[in-house]
Amino acid sequence: MPAIASLLLALFAQDEAAVRAAVSRSLPYLEKDGVAWMRERACLSCHHVPFLLWSHRIAQAKGIPLDAGKLSAWTEWARKESTQQRVKVRLSPEGLEALRAAEVPADTLEKLTGFPKKFGGGKEEVYLAELAKLLTPDELARHRDALLKHATRDKGDGGGLDSMVQLLLSGSYAAGDAEFVDATLGRIRELQRADGSWKPGGQLFSTNRSAAEATQLTTSWAVLALPDADGARGRSYIQDASAGKVLEGLVVRLLLATKRGEPCEDLKELLARQNADGGWASLHGAESDAFATGQALFVLPATGAEEAVRRGRRFLLERQRDDGSWPVPPAALTSSKRKPETQKTLVPIYGYWGSAWASIGLASTLP
């Protein structure tokens, strides 16, 4: 046994330089596409921006050189974007009456009469952009203050439950951001339903899982992000649930058990689902993919499963492309009912998402 242990240590040391190089190669790709998503879509997005931060934060923590100034700027952008999306601004019938009382001209009000039916609310700049579709630039400039003053403000989702959870799990917001962290945790708590679950949203409805499994997975990630004392109702909801058919269910259940220092039978299942090529498949019995393999490597270092980690590392090292990304076909994750032309449009999304998980997983195995 000592000889085997020494061999494993030697293999890990040999792999470490290659792993660091692979993570380092992935960062320019993740930066390029992640920043483009922010710039072109102004969208927080559960599959891009949080993973841009997460991949770079963990690389930084492992001593991999990167531009700390850029990371700080992206982190601040995400904080502001999520904060803006905590409020949904819209124009209600009551708001129209208030504008009439504020003596906004009748011809301007006439243009706004259909507005409440066409727009359910968004962050302030989106609200103003919707108004710009109906009013002339001069009208919008003259009445901008009144239109903002008399708008109805509802609670928003902070960019999406998944996005808020991922921002917290990425470790991007530490002691200096206590106010943002507290506000984010508070909004997550407010979104919890009476039965203890959280409603799935974003990409989870289009991935290859049932509505029940999507709810269980969403709830599990939310519980993981919350302080332990706040997760009781969520844990009660998921305690008797199966792991589901996608590997992510096993991963998050194992993360929850590790967080609480509890034994978890799911480790045996996770190890049993490692394919002969060293990778893991999102769907049991399918071909290995970078998305699932990255997630498995993210959780396994804390379990002591060195041989499984070594083989998973090797799978990813051998399949990284020249641009630093990994191939992740949408068919590995999304619903089989999607048309081929629709799946084609998802290639950039799943490629980025899975490459980020591969980078995070590899970095997680580093000392």
Image (spheres, rainbow, N blue to C red):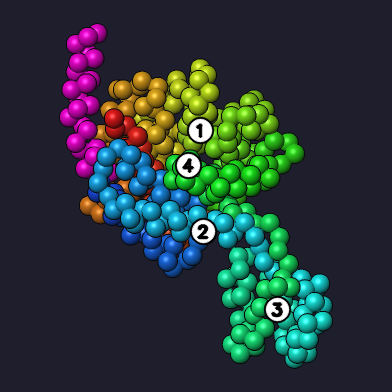
Q: Which residue is mark 1?
A: 252
Task: For label 1, count other residues whose C-alpha is less than 10 Å away and answer few (under 14), some (14-19) or many (20+).
Answer: many
Distance, label 1 to label 2, CA atoms, is 28 Å
Quadrant (top left/top right/bottom left/bottom right) for the N terminus: top left
Q: Are marks 1 and 3 in contact (CB under 8 Å)?
A: no
Assign the C terminus to one quadrant of the image. top left
Give the secondary structure at mark 3. Answer: helix
Foreground of the two, 279 or 37: 37
Q: Residue at x 32, y 28 (%)?
A: 309
Q: Amino acid at mark 2?
A: Lys
Q: Position of residue 116 (x, y in %)?
A: 74, 72
Magenta region: which residues?
A: 1-23
Question: What residue sits 22% from the left and 21% below the top?
Answer: 9
Of labels 1 and 3, earlier in sequence is 3
Secondary-structure class at tag 2: helix
The image shows residue 314 at horizontal and vertical percentages of: 25, 34
Q: Earlier in the sequence, mark 1 or mark 4?
A: 4
* Among the two numbered marks 4 and 3 on one chain, the one whose residue lies closer to the N terminus: 3
Label 1 and label 4: CA atoms lie apart by 25 Å
Q: On residue 172, which mark appears? A: none
Verify whether residue 16 appears in magenta. yes
The residue closer to the viewer here, 321 or 43, is: 43
Amino acid, disc 1: Val
**What mark, if any, has residue 146 been given in the picture?**
3
Q: Residue under circle 2?
A: 80
Nearest-to-viewer mark from 1 and 2: 2
Q: Is residue 311 above or below residue 208?
A: above
Instruction: Name the residue beneath numbered marker 4.
Output: 175
Separation (CA) of disc 2 from disc 4: 17 Å
Q: Residues within 10 Å of mark 2 (few under 14, many from 20)?
A: some
